Amino acid sequence: MSVFKGEVTSLPPDKSISHRAALIASLSDGETEIMNFSAGFDNQSTLGVLQACGIPVRQEEVPGPWGAAVRRVVIQSKGLWSFTPPSAPLQCNNSGSTMRMFSGILAGQPFQSELVGDASLLKRPMRRIADPLMQMGAGVSLSPVGTAPVVITGTKDLRAISYRLPVASAQVKSLVAFAGLHAEGETRIYEPLLSRDHTELMLGLEPRIENNERVIVVPGRRQLDARPFQIPADPSAACFIVALGLLGRGSEIMIRDVCLNPTRAAFLDILIRSGAAVTIENRRTVGGESIGDILVDGSRDMEPLVISDPQEVAIAIDELPMLGVLSSFATERFELTNAAELRTKESDRIEALAMNLERLGFECHQEPAGLSVTGRRERPAGPVEVECYDDHRIAMSFAVASKACGEDIVLSDREVAGVSFPNFFSLIDSLEV
Ligand code: S3P
């Protein structure tokens, strides 16, 4: 069992907010400065597709508030219709956010484009983006099974629509909002379950409540003026460090300047409810987002995690793999239901968790929308290879268990962590005492 101590000031900048800052900059009139942009592969894919569509992007390293360098990105645009037809398919690599959210923008451009990705992205469901965009008047074609390549025939004549999200998805909400910015009239997005709300916050769209449902109203064809963005640290990355501290008994870790937007911080509520010693300090608002410091004290026992509320699942969706691995190793129990969406991520994360936990000796039972871990038969004697399935969060979840619990785990792919957390391995090594 290892012990971890220290202060973390080098978490990656938030992936979701970085994507949106770059996309909104590409739609705004003028020069946008984004401070602390993420170096993760996914966010770099978004900058790549913008450049391939004629948007000038500059990146440089500048001194950050904690001493180490941070990334400053500058994006130039002349507003909603500044894109030029790409000369080749747009490469989104592993990034579902890039493919889905940029599709909303391409739907409003008067040219045809094609979006492609890596093996993992080519398996993910895309009908959820084709449906609203086709209702708005764009042409969208997919593979026969509803996956990428996505070919979009955009139009300057997009129509505003009223759209009720069939699944809780901030990516789909955002792509409809981005398309809505190009459409004639007001686009209304009904959201039965709340998902992360960065797009609304960053576009200054105040949600309304109608008949108990959240509605976002997007005014079409309004000029957006360039404004600077400052990206806080990624709570989904913080979750791995929190789990490291909780599994490494006797650990004490302070994590600084983390985005604590309530639509992202549900994993902390889940942990606190289960008795974990996690506290929030120094809460404040920066650039419209709530941020604060997280103190992890790994000296207390926690109860098994039981996660079943669909709303909670929606806003802890990216943290569920780490929570599942943490609960399994700390308590030999885990209970997750109402989480079918977890099968549509960079991998089928229910399957990936179950297969790997079983290899590590746990008893698992999969349901279409969930997973339960009911105990551990044995701890395997030799090294166990964990299959990462092209999925950064699966790789990092098991890497945390390996590091903190002294499990002999070999990851099938360490590089994939760089999708969202390029300094993951050096950071966890630096915290070990
Ligand atoms: C994201 C939304 C979520 C999340 C993904 C990032 C976003 O996906 O899993 O990592 O930035 O909007 P869905 O919208 O598919 O739920």
Image: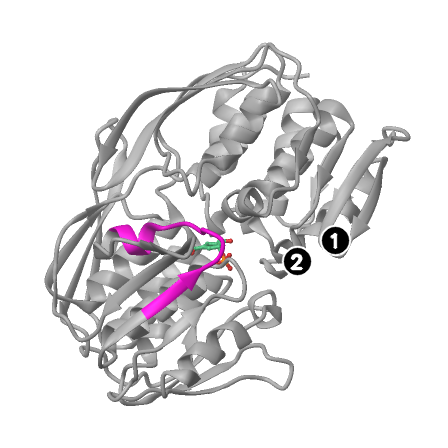
- Split into 4 quadrants, where in the image is the N terminus? top right
- Report the residue marked by disc 1: 351
Question: Does label 1 point to a residue whose CB lies under 8 Å from ligand 1?
Answer: no
Q: Label 1 vs label 2: CA separation? A: 7 Å
Is residue 112 shown left or right of residue 27? Answer: right
Q: Can residue 414 be seen by looking at this rendering? A: no
Which residue is at 17% across, 75% downward?
221
Is residue 311 covered in magenta?
Answer: no
Looking at this view, name the residue that lies furthest to the front: 211
Depth order, front residue of 104/95: 104
Query: Which label is found at residue 343?
Result: 2
Residue 239's place in the image compared with 420, above or below, is above
Start-end of magenta stretch: 188-201
Residue 38 placement (x, y as % from top left): 34, 48
Q: To which quarter of the image does residue 46 belong?
A: bottom left
Which residue is at 56% across, 30% downward?
270
